[in-house]
Image (cartoon, helix red, strand yellow):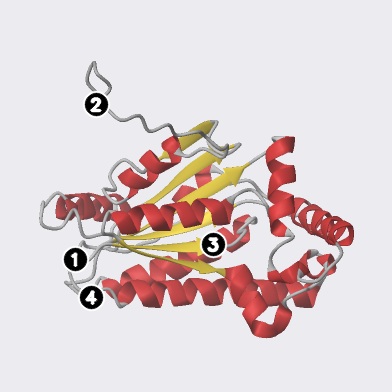
Amino acid sequence: AVSATKEEPLAAMSEWMEKTADPQVVSCEAVVLVLVGLPARGKSFICGAVVRHLKLLGVRVRSFNAGELRRESGKAGIEADFFSSSNVEAKKERERLAMLCCGRLLEWIRAAPPGTSSIGILDATNTTMLRRQRVLETCFAAAQEADHDDKAAPLRVIFLESLCTDPKILLDNYQMKLSNDDYKGAESEAALNDFKKRVEAYEAQYEPLQESELDLLQSRQSSVAMPVGSVQIYDGGQKISCCRTGSSLVAAPLISLLHAMHLTRRQILLAPETDLNGV
């Protein structure tokens, strides 16, 4: 272990980089992908695309959705007031469910077979800096525990924030949201109005991701290094910004997928090859 000095965070990061420089280790990595964004910004759509893509590549991946956990706990069909920052009891419940999701995600990562890369996706809004800090601290505690296990994969966190201001994309996303269990059996116009109020409640407390948040753990005196990076995707892929993701082998196909992702329907024409006689 690295001795506890004022240079310890930098030394720990250097040690982590040296460890992952081994070709036998670099492909073994545990990533917590933390989604960030207002409702109907395409987070779950991105999550589904990432899960399918990484499974095709043989990566162990699973999503943990806070909204699904809320509905499973008997809170489907909750009205917009539940998401208001002024609703203290509801806010506590939302935080509890989000951190329960995070805990289950980390348990799943810890259960990975030795030598296996894993990506756990925390699919929630995570719209406040305080929530994101709690997620980081919970992940850091898990990284400290894993440091005592030589077979555990190095843990890193990547925030993936989806931002959207395109009115057409937002309208399409709003319509798709009306098909989930929160609005099952509801009249479409009333459901849409309620969902818009939910979005407004989140907008009132939304704190966009800041690069400074990636350094929140740098002051910790610990021999454990947990790299933190971020990706921001705008309007369904019109612009993508990456920060501190380059040293992650598992993150590489994720970034590549985001660059190739599109939201509009496309025609695919299959033309058989023939000779001059049309055969």
Amino acid found under the numbered disc labelled 1? Ala
Residue 148's label in the rendered image is 4
Mark 2 and mark 1: Cα distance apart in space: 70 Å
**Is disc 3 placed on a helix, strand or loop?**
strand
The residue drawn where x is 48% and y is 51% is 159
Dividing the image into 4 quarters, which one contains the N terminus? bottom left
Amino acid found under the numbered disc labelled 4? His
The first of marks 4 and 1 along the sequence is 1
Q: Residue furthest bottom?
A: 74
Mark 1 and mark 3: Cα distance apart in space: 34 Å
Of marks 2 and 1, the one in the foreground: 2
Is 82 positioned to the left or the right of 270 in the image? right
The first of marks 3 and 2 along the sequence is 3
Q: Residue 22, percent across and down?
A: 11, 52
Label 3 Cα neighbours within 10 Å, binned few <14 / some 14-19 / many ≥20: many
**Is disc 4 placed on a helix, strand or loop?**
loop
Residue 279's label in the rendered image is 2
The residue drawn where x is 74% and y is 56% is 202
Dividing the image into 4 quarters, which one contains the C terminus? top left
User: Contact, CB < 8 Å: mark 1 with mark 3?
Assistant: no
Q: Residue 75, percent across and down?
A: 72, 79
The first of marks 3 and 4 along the sequence is 3
Q: Which residue is mark 3?
A: 123
Label 2 Cα neighbours within 10 Å, binned few <14 / some 14-19 / many ≥20: few
Q: Which residue is mark 1?
A: 1
